[in-house]
Amino acid sequence: MSLHCRNSLLAFALVALLAGCNREERNSRGKPLAETAPGMVTPDTILPGNARPSAPDPRAAQYENNAPSISQGQTLFAQMNCSGCHSHGGGGMGPALMDAKWRYGGRMDQIVASIAEGRPNGMPAWRGKLTEQQMWQIAAYVRTLSGQERKDAVSARADEMSNTPPQTQIEREPIESAESGQQ
Amino acid sequence: MTRLAHRLIALPLGFLSACAGNQNAMGGQGLESANFIVLFLVFLAVCAVMYLLVLAGLGIALRRRRDAGQANSVDEDRHEETSARTKVALIVWTGLVTVGLTILTVASFFSDRSNASSTRRSGLALTITGNQWWWNVQYDTSDPSASVRTANEIHLPVNVPVHVTLKSNDVIHSFWVPNLAGKQDLIPGRQTDIELLPRRTGVFHGQCAEFCGVQHTRMALDVIVEPLDDFRRWYAQQLATAPAPTTRLQMAGYRYFVTRECSSCHNVAGSPAGGQIGPDLTHVASRRSIGAGTLPLNRGNLYGWIADPQSHKPGSRMPTIPMEPRDLHSLVAYIETLK
């Protein structure tokens, strides 16, 4: 009886280990879905805040809390010089990415839309310069800056000197949308 | 019986075939590699002689022990005679060990000196930067406008000492062209160096020799050692900007290249595409391979690589860009002009 008990405990422990697997799931090519940014909104629909009520994009789940995607996003964040305006999340010419304020929404698909379409007052549009997959990866990384992603999926090491705490130490910020008109 | 003997002889000779070719530590086409071969053969000879002597000594000891066991009694005189002989043997043995070790030390000393001698007169300097998973190559000159940037392929003039500065952009890699020299690590945040002195012309294969991620195996580079005149011609051609596209198809490919994802990472000198993140493509069509040695460069492989790099090199930093067939067609036509 105790042997049976031990066996089932062992089986349970092994199954529990599987829960950690999706953290490392690699999907190097991306899903061959229609190549459209979420919603494919045109510039005249840009509204500050969470105005656009839409169902969360199913692709977000592939990239969120996924260690390879987040670290790819981290590399791209540096390579595409996002820190030129956003610093390492603290903000400079561009808004800070590590606080609770999201002018155009803090969901994965909203961040991807901001990257793809660009935003007024300086954010360039990256559609056609980065692939959809790369934008999703950057979005996943951007969310780690305010502690939205799971701590076991984020990179423990920053790629460059940084004045912000390591991502594994960042407290999770609530996602608030800035009031419209406020800059 | 003779056939079996032939086979037994042929078997170890078959292993030697692994030593042939353009990625071979026993090639000896570079100064360091040639010195290494001499050193290796000296070590092999000295160690082989000592090994055979030890085995012979062991055989004699086993035989004597058996003879003594059969005699059943130890003769006092014979014992003294034996111990005198053992003394002589031990003295000779000590002498042999001393001589052997001295030969090895002296050989290793001169080999090191010979390797170091090439560093005093460097004729060519280049910086190789490791990236996941390709090599960035920059020929350093005092005049920046005369400096060539390329990737995954280096050309070296024969009999000219080369100083290679090694850097890394991400993780530790290791630069290894076995035909020319030993390995040297590329360490992020640091600078390491290696001296090469190619002695014979040829096309050699280099390989990353430190595990650096999922595509470590497909991080290779081609090394072409050629006469000085050929090298100068190649260098002048690499220094030129890319030719302008001429046909309508090439023009379309050019437009796609400079306006879309390609130009975010790749540089083509003489065009608006100026990305520094990926390999420089100014003269990509003059190289031997694509994807850091992943595929030989030809039209079919170019189509395959651009259409879906992730199936040839999964995890590569070059993303699969979904594109229309006509875009792919024109892009390949344009890239083929980048000679």
Image (cartoon, coloured by chain):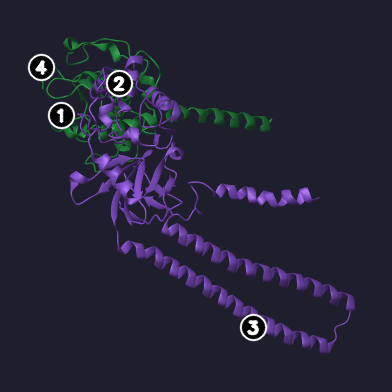
Which quarter shows the N terminus of chain A?
A: top right
Chain letter of the residue carrying label 3: B
Circle nearer the N terminus (2, 4): 2
Q: Amino acid at mark 2?
A: Met
Drawing shade for chain A: green
Label 4, label 1: how far apart the Cα atoms are: 17 Å
Specify whether residue A158 is in view. no
Q: Nearer the viewer, residue A45 or A1?
A: A45
Circle nearer the N terminus (4, 1): 1
- In the rendering, at what x and y percent does residue A136 appear? 32, 23
Query: Helix, strand or loop at disc 4?
Result: loop
- In the rendering, at what x and y percent does residue B299 appear? 40, 26
Q: Nearer the viewer, residue B127 or A80?
A: B127
**The label number, if any, that marks residue A94 in the structure image:** 1
Q: Callout 4 environment at 10 Å: few (<14), some (14 to 19), or many (20+)?
A: few
Which quarter shows the C terminus of chain A?
A: top left
